[in-house]
Amino acid sequence: MASYAAAAKAQSEIYSSLKVLWQFLSSPRWNTKSNRSRIRLLEYFENADEVHRSSEVPNLQDVLAGIRVELRNTQNGRQGCVIVVEDIEPSQVEMLGEALDIDPVFFAGYLGTDFRNLEHHALPLWATTLPSESASQESLHLHHQRPTRLTTNAVIPKHVILVTNGNVVRAVRRLSTIGDTNVALVRSCCSLIRKVFESGFWICMFKRSHCAIHIADDDEFQA
């Protein structure tokens, strides 16, 4: 059976909108510059004495191993769980995709948020999906721009490209200076997917982006 990354590569050769996912999984950049993700697990129980429990977990593999056990044992009272991932890593995309059987389109929709030269790049999935198709899916992407104050008050040359300093690189657009304060808009995305299994156990996964900003390297972002 082909790995999740191999499946994503094969599909990206047919559907250009999935190339952003394959680039994220295969870029050598992630071997040297990747940040540590933050993962939080919220568990929901049938027992009224403990309706839910929240904890921060250091290892996604342990969470997925526990879910596999849960799918085989439905007698311990746990109804479902929410997995919150901040600044997801490529290896985590593969683990989640394989363990939960998630369509690569979902991850591509989270990664692809920027408009590029339309003559050379495909539109992101969020700009090409019909509302009727989105409404029938068990997933949702909330694309938005966050206003933020740059931490430096120094004058930043216009030719300098700013991006977010996370595993998923987001574009940053500078606005007019307000007094002595540099202000910018950060393109971002929050994504949610829900999976319900035959046993009735359910999983919701919520992904959010990292918002710290830095100056882009030459190979990091090209508008």
Image (spheres, grey):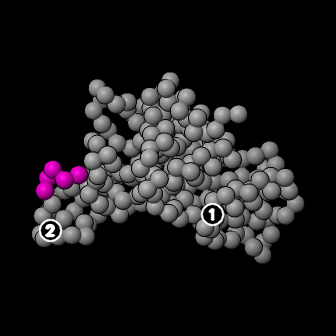
The residues colored magenta run 157-161
**Quadrant in which the C terminus is drawn:** top left
Q: Nearer the viewer, residue 142 or 105?
A: 105
Most foreground residue, 22 or 158: 22
Q: Earlier in the sequence, mark 1 or mark 2?
A: 1
Residue kind at label 1, given as amino acid type: Asn
Helix, strand or loop under label 2:
loop
Q: Read off the residue under disc 1.
A: 59
Tag on residue 80? none
Where residue 173 appears, x then y in whole percent?
A: 24, 52
Measured from the top left, where is residue 8 in percent x and y? Answer: 55, 35
- In front: 96, or 189? 96
Residue at 68% in and 60% down: 63
Q: Total number of numbered labels?
A: 2
Q: Is residue 170 above or below residue 177?
A: above
The amino acid type, in three-letter code, at marker 2 is Ala
196 lies left or right of 166: right
Where in the figure is residue 164, as x and y percent of width and height?
Answer: 34, 57
Q: Residue at x 57, y 39 (%)?
A: 5
Q: Give the residue drawn at x 44%, y 44%.
A: 27
Q: Is residue 221 left or right of residue 175?
A: right
- Residue, disc 2: 154
Left or right side of 150 for 74: right
The answer, for residue 172, to whether it is visible in the render is no
Is residue 206 inside the magenta stretch? no
Q: Quadrant of the N terminus?
A: top right
